[in-house]
């Protein structure tokens, strides 16, 4: 055999095969390229919500070309608050605070039903103080660690969905519980007493719905199945909770966003610099993409004309439906220009946070967190999410009409 025969290429071999014979299989990718492709695919799967938000934002850019008005889309107070909160929560994770607290919860409550009540209602009442988005950023990791510590991951979809519902509905009672409340409270100059009176009935019905749904969890005994975590240093936890309070104050404009951000960032750079590596920057980018999407949608003349024609028929129904497409905060800003029925609009943009995953930014936070914690189970989560959200929404729409009769 000569050298030419020894060095014959695979293509030449295939050409020499009889007609109809199968060709040689393509050579596999080199290990380095295969590994890179796998990493890219895994990255895309883990950020599917960001990708959807980015594509939606890009589509709307064809209808509203980028201009100076885009700068008004971004709520820097919310973005700064979210970044600082994520950083502080990451610092608490670095010190294993949530593992330690989850052990205390499992030990104190003893069965799965009581544990579920504790996780859901700490989110419910927490959202009244720190707003729904920040409540979820704080308490979803706690839910994960509690369920992991007692080996109950199968309950994670239910607990996460109920925490999400609790965050969206718990904040409705107070003017600062949800961002849209702050806006409407100021825009219509609503009195504090009137605000509480209008939201009292939907809040009470939401409480009953959430409590009743949590009773579906069987009261099976639970116990710690992981070694209890060591209690973190008290002084460090005090500092981190002070920083967390500063982070939440940004969204309430207690001080300018860049001052609060600077204090939090500098403090964590000194005390816990590694926490910035754990921040979910994909979530921040998702918020940015969603701001562009909703901002552009509100500027499309056909959308504005359509909503203007509908709002007179039923502020409650139009407001709730609008939330399903462009989220509750943009809906509050957009629809406030077309109606003086602020009572129905206030109820609509609070209960309208239920429904689709884009009805509230809080729901996007929960979806992203669940996908990260339980990859491969997103379909089950979305099915349960839709069942509970739309069931609650139907009941609360009926409550909203009853509320309109009480407060015409």
Image (spheres, helix red, strand yellow):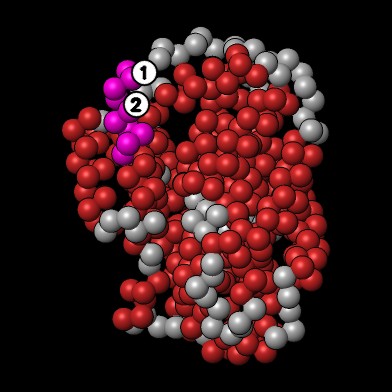
Within the magenta stretch, is there residue 224? no
- In the displayed structure, would residue 303 be above or below residue 169? below
Asked where in the image residue 279 lies, by quadrant, the reply is top left
Residue 84 left/right relative to 295: left
- The main secondary structure of the magenta stretch is helix
Within the magenta stretch, is there residue 241? yes
Q: Which residue is mark 2?
A: 237
Residue drawn at x 75%, y 35% is: 214
In this view, the residue in front, 25 or 198, is 198
Residue 371 in view, yes or no: no
Q: Which residue is mark 1?
A: 232
In this view, the residue in front, 235 or 229, is 235
Residue drawn at x 55%, y 78% is: 336
Q: Residue lying at the far top in this picture: please name it.
A: 227
Residue drawn at x 22%, y 30% is: 271
Residue drawn at x 58%, y 21% is: 105
Range of magenta residues: 232-243
Contact check, label 2 and label 1, Cβ < 8 Å: yes
How many numbered markers are drawn? 2
| Quadrant in which the N terminus is drawn | top left
């Amino acid at each position: 055999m000569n050298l030419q025969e020894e060095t014959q290429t695979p293509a030449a071999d295939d050409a020499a095969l009889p007609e109809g014979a199968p060709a040689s299989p393509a050579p596999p990718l080199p290990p380095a390229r295969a590994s890179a492709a796998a990493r890219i695919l895994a990255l895309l799967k883990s950020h599917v919500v960001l990708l959807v938000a980015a594509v939606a934002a890009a589509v709307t850019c064809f209808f509203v070309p980028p201009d100076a008005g885009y700068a008004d889309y971004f709520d820097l107070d919310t973005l700064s608050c979210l970044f600082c909160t994520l950083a502080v929560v990451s610092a608490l994770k670095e010190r294993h605070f949530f593992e330690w607290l989850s052990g205390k919860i499992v030990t104190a409550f003893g069965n799965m039903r009581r544990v579920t009540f504790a996780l859901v209602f700490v989110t419910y009442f927490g959202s009244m103080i720190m707003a729904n988005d920040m409540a979820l950023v704080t308490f979803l990791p706690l839910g994960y660690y509690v369920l992991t510590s007692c080996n109950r991951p199968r309950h994670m979809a239910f607990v996460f969905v109920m925490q999400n519902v609790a965050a969206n509905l718990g904040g409705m009672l107070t003017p600062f519980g949800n961002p849209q409340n702050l806006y409407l409270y100021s825009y219509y100059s609503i009195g504090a007493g009137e605000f509480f009176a209008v939201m009292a009935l939907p809040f009470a019905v939401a409480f009953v719905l959430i409590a009743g749904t949590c009773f579906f969890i069987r009261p099976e005994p639970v116990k710690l199945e992981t070694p209890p975590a060591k209690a973190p240093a008290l002084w460090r936890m005090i500092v981190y909770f002070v920083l967390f309070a500063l982070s939440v104050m940004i969204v309430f404009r207690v001080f300018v966003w860049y001052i609060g951000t600077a204090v939090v960032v500098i403090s964590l750079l000194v005390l816990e610099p590694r926490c910035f590596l754990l921040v979910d920057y994909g979530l921040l980018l998702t918020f940015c993409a969603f701001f562009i999407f909703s901002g552009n949608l509100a500027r499309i003349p056909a959308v504005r004309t359509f909503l203007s024609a509908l709002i007179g028929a039923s502020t409650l129904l139009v407001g709730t439906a609008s939330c399903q497409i462009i989220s509750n905060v943009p809906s509050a800003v957009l629809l406030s220009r077309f109606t003086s029925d602020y009572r129905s609009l206030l109820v609509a943009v609070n209960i309208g946070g239920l429904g689709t995953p884009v009805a509230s930014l809080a729901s996007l936070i929960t979806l992203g967190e669940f996908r990260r914690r339980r990859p491969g189970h997103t379909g089950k989560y979305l099915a349960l999410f839709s069942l509970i959200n739309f069931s609650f929404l139907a009941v609360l729409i009926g409550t909203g009409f009853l509320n309109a009769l009480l407060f015409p």
